[in-house]
Amino acid sequence: SEIKVELIENAITQFCVEGDVVNYERYGNGHINDTFVVVFQKNSEQTRYILQRINNSIFKNPEQLMFNITQVTSFLKDEVKRLGGDSRREVITVINTKEGASFYQDTEENYWRMYLFIEDASCFEQVSRPEDFFQSAVAFGRFQKLLSDFDASSLYEVIPDFHNTPLRYKTFLQAVKEDKCNRAKEVQDEIMFFIKREEDMEYCKRCLEEGKLPLRVTHNDTKLNNVMIDNKTGNGLCVIDLDTVMPGLSIFDFGDSIRFGANTATEDEKDLTKVNLDLELFEEYVKGYLKGCEGSLTDAEIAMLPFGAKTMTLECGMRFLTDYIEGDVYFRIHKPEHNLDRCHTQMSLVLDMERKWNEMNEIVSKAKGGNL
Ligand code: ADP
Ligand code: MG
Ligand code: MG
């Protein structure tokens, strides 16, 4: 969306950065926030920063969101320093405003923040090499490990009930019952697919409630392009895009990565024979994630990684179906049955996971060292 130049330039001056602004421009391929790179110069040295306007139509409470980000990044920095790492490259650095706040609210309800620009590192949009997928898994695993002593319950639920699968199931049943657009009759098979898997969708949440799975700090947007890969070493360097950091389940962060990263087709592929779980990519991710987590996951979490992948895929497919039944009110569609197409790919992926269930579990067990 267009933002007035005066607003951008005013926002830039609010933050605690020394030197003069040389230039600024839009930056990156993010779909949520408005992201700019800003170059400052002091004496002869230039330094880049990221300026972002937080998307406050999605994130209704930017104060709470920034609270989460400052708490988590300062904890991460301490951990990285303790381990002898470079906390300015391995963790997002929030630049405060001149008033000492972590964000700036302008007169038009825009919320701005500034980060140090992480230099000599790249974000990839697609998995073009299994190695990149592996590295993103290492980075997200390490993120989990570094935060394993952080009290997740102290964080705000930025999007309440984001992965409350049983609640989403209730919403789905309600949509079917109301059937506002008279579409339910066309999608009886799809509806039954999810109803048949009701217990699966409730299982992870119940494990959390019964204390079988711990509450963790989760990222909730574990896409490849939210990890910076070091240009020199090729290693996963830093997890970025912390807007959706919340309390949750580690296996859901893992699972969502698998859902979109280890799927052999796009999310709206019409030819469902192309939709499969790529076991090689699954194995890469499992290995990377366990490596990054370095012993910080419980045995129950590790054993339930495949379940996390299946639950995330079920939940996502069910949300597409719910939106189709409700008349495409939530997800942006580009053609009439787009949400139904998307639902079908997720169903196919679930079916493929069910077919490959033993292999998935063997891969996890092997990566752990065989004693699950
Ligand atoms: P969105 O929620 O819109 O995806 P991101 O926080 O992921 O927003 O930022 C969008 C893009 O900006 C990222 O994919 C990355 O390329 C770039 N970016 C974000 N933060 C930094 C940073 N601290 N250093 C370098 N690049 C960054
Ligand atoms: Mg992003
Ligand atoms: Mg984001």
Image (tube, rainbow, N blue to C red):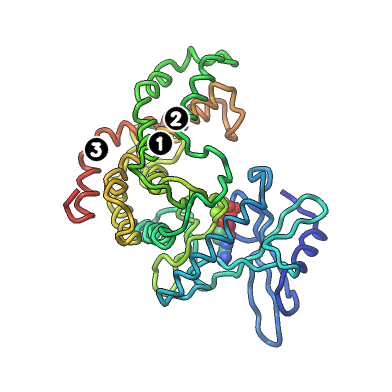
Residue 152 place in picture, x, y as percent: 48, 52
Residue position for label 3? 356
Would residue 302 appear left or right of 163 to someone viewing this image?
A: left
* In this view, 330 is above or below 109: above
Residue 361 place in picture, x, y as percent: 23, 43
Residue position for label 2? 166
> Is residue 261 in sight in this rendering?
no
Would residue 182 appear left or right of 21 to someone viewing this image?
A: left
Of labels 3 and 1, the one closer to you: 1
The residue drawn where x is 40% and y is 74% is 83
| Ligand 3 is within 8 Å of the C-beta of the residue at disc 2 | no
Mark 3 or mark 1: whose residue is earlier in sequence:
1
* In this view, 84 is above or below 235: below
Tag 3: Cα neighbours inside 10 Å, few (<14), some, or many (≥20)? some
Measure the C-alpha gap from mark 2 to mark 1.
8 Å
Of labels 2 and 3, the one closer to you: 2
* Secondary structure state at the residue bearing disc 3: loop
Residue 104 place in picture, x, y as percent: 73, 60
Amino acid type, label 3:
Lys
* Secondary structure state at the residue bearing disc 1: helix
Amino acid type, label 1:
Lys
Q: Between residues 12 and 343, which one lies in front from this camera angle?
A: 12
Residue position for label 1? 205
Residue 228 place in picture, x, y as percent: 48, 64
The residue drawn where x is 79% and y is 56% is 106
- The answer to whether mark 2 and mark 1 are in CB contact below 8 A is yes
- Looking at the rendering, which quadrant does residue 132 occupy? bottom left
